[in-house]
Amino acid sequence: VQDPVGPKPPDPLPAVDQFGPPAPPVEAEREVPAGKDPSPAPLPVVEPSSNTNPALSLAPATTALPAFSPSYRALADVEASLLAWAVARPAHARAWRLADGEAASAPVLEFGAAGGLDFDARPCVLLIGGLDGQALEGGEAVLAVTHSLLEQPERLPANVCFLSLPWAAPEALSGALAGKVFDGRNARALDEDADGAFDEDGPDDLDGDGQILDLLIEDSRGLWARSKDLRFLVRAEPGDQPRYTLVKEGRDDDGDGRFNEDGPGGVVLDMNFPVGRRAGTGDARLGPYPLSEPLTRALAELATQRRVALALFFQGQHGQAAAPGGTDWKQAPGLVSELDRAVYARTGELFSVLTRRRQPSFLSLREARGEARPGAAIDWFYASLGVLALEVAPWGPRAELREEGPARDARFARPDGAGAPGERGGPSAAPRWHDGARPPAEADREWALWLDNVHGGLGFSAWRPIELGGARATRAWIGGWEPRTRANPPPESMARCLTGLDEFALSLSSALPRLDLRVSELTRRGEVVSLRAALRNAGHLPTGLEGPPLEGRSSAGRGAVMTLELPSGARLLAGAERVPLGRLAGQELSTEAAWVVFAPQGSVLQLRAEAPWAAPHTQELRP
Ligand SMILES: [Ca+2]
Ligand SMILES: [Ca+2]
Ligand SMILES: [Ca+2]
Ligand SMILES: [Ca+2]
């Protein structure tokens, strides 16, 4: 599954089943004794600040944050917003650029609660928008979450650092905003068809209507056939006729018989990571080698330098929160280990509650997207760094379908008759368009429900015949989803599809583990000191993840650790200097460790606790 690139995968922890089936809510300060099987509680939702009366709001450190309202905006506007927010919140935020000095760099806002540890020593939450190069609404999601968190900085969890990158793929997002880039590729020129010419055959506006939609070409070897819904296609099966090839609207510019086989760009940054690349062999979007692009390399370096606990990638058009597994089939064991699936299931439930969207509690990236996603960033963040990485899609058919209503089919209510079968007259007319045997794929059915019940049936351009010219008399049709319907939300849906994402990000980051040392004995007899201590995880998420189920790993590694540091003149008589405690679940108390130390009077011992997702904690002991 994983190519041998990037940091070593995390080591497994003792096989303690810390997560069983979901349990009813429990009190926040429940303590789970060591060795027991703590039943998992739902992750708590952070309540809105109780200090809601503006007259009573005396938080002095803040000035007015410039207002924010979601819309389609350009990179310069994104960057200007981050700079303005950093100026308005000097105690909490600073703005900088990732891959500064490269052709494409991405603006960053780093922020967190005032006071406490330096930002780069804190556990870190990444909020990344549009790394797929398509999700402009992902950029708006990161801006909206960031703005909401900075509006009430007193709600920010202590000692957690947030890194917001709203436009993580600036070249492709700029292209998407201008309607020129459709598949998320950056500006690197590639010769996809290896004919020695670069970018010689990209999409064109064939019918001059100002839009580039889809082009359907009748082709006996095509991969697509009709469905029962005349708008949608299904994957062709043996015996299906006629069949179609589906491409972006365009002509065969170089006359090689293929359409749009070498368009502008480039690499999809979200597919440029080292995990699962074999599934995308021959797909130029993955790039020539893992982390080949300056921005993906800079992002990976940043992630390895920081203590990243949580990474939310706001992108995709499935409207759900997807876990790693971009190449996982439903039945396969999958990239995410059993133990970690339970953690992901709890985040999925939290997402459901806070966004009021129905979704399966565990959903792999491949299931959510309905197709393989090789080289996906979340797969690498999870598999190599043990990060709780999720793809959160603000937009999707369910973003506005929160309650089930009676289904209505707007195709029969269109006054202009659009949606009627695309036919040509005469004896050579194409077979009727709506005689497909199979229903559309599930995703298409959901989008059809949104289109008809929420969007009044507008936004899908009915297939209409077009002359392609050239030697072959090929039948072809232009049609499909119009811009800002399925690939990105209509402008009026933008704010609605971001609802609840700020509370989701805040609740997850507030649930990160917190280390609490419990010293149960500290006694001195002459120069001999006896010490007993345990470590409690006072947060609601575990201290880290197990990582993917890979063979041949040793069992030391990513759990919580207590370390006893002695001053000069002192020495250990019994007990270990470094005590690995394994992974601690939310609220779990570790087993107790004991030490006997030779320590002259006046010695100061340091007991230090560390864990992958938590701020380190040191306690001074003066026996
Ligand atoms: Ca070429
Ligand atoms: Ca190209
Ligand atoms: Ca057109
Ligand atoms: Ca061509």
Image: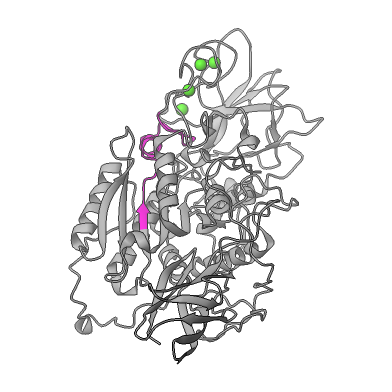
Tally of numbered discs? 0
Q: Name the residue at 29% across, 45% down.
A: 97
Rendering quarter of residue 5: top right
Q: Position of residue 59 (x, y in %)?
A: 21, 77
Q: Position of residue 504 (x, y in %)?
A: 46, 66
Name above or below for residue 600 compared with residue 461. Answer: below
Please report the bounds of the magenta region as a residue range.
163-187
15 sits to left or right of 490 = right
Could you tell me which quadrant the N terminus lies in?
A: top right
Rendering quarter of residue 92: bottom left
88 sits to left or right of 3 = left
158 sits to left or right of 232 = left
Name above or below for residue 13 compared with residue 74. Answer: below
Whether residue 149 is visible, yes or no, is: yes
Q: Position of residue 79 (x, y in %)?
A: 26, 47
Residue 178 sits inside the magenta stretch:
yes
Whether residue 78 is visible, yes or no, is: no
Name above or below for residue 397 compared with residue 403. Answer: above
Q: Position of residue 470 (x, y in %)?
A: 57, 9
Residue 328 sits inside the magenta stretch:
no
Front-lying residue, 223 or 431: 223
Q: Name the residue at 51% across, 38% down.
A: 272
Rendering quarter of residue 103: top left
Q: Name the residue at 51% across, 58% down.
A: 399
Front-lying residue, 459 or 131: 131
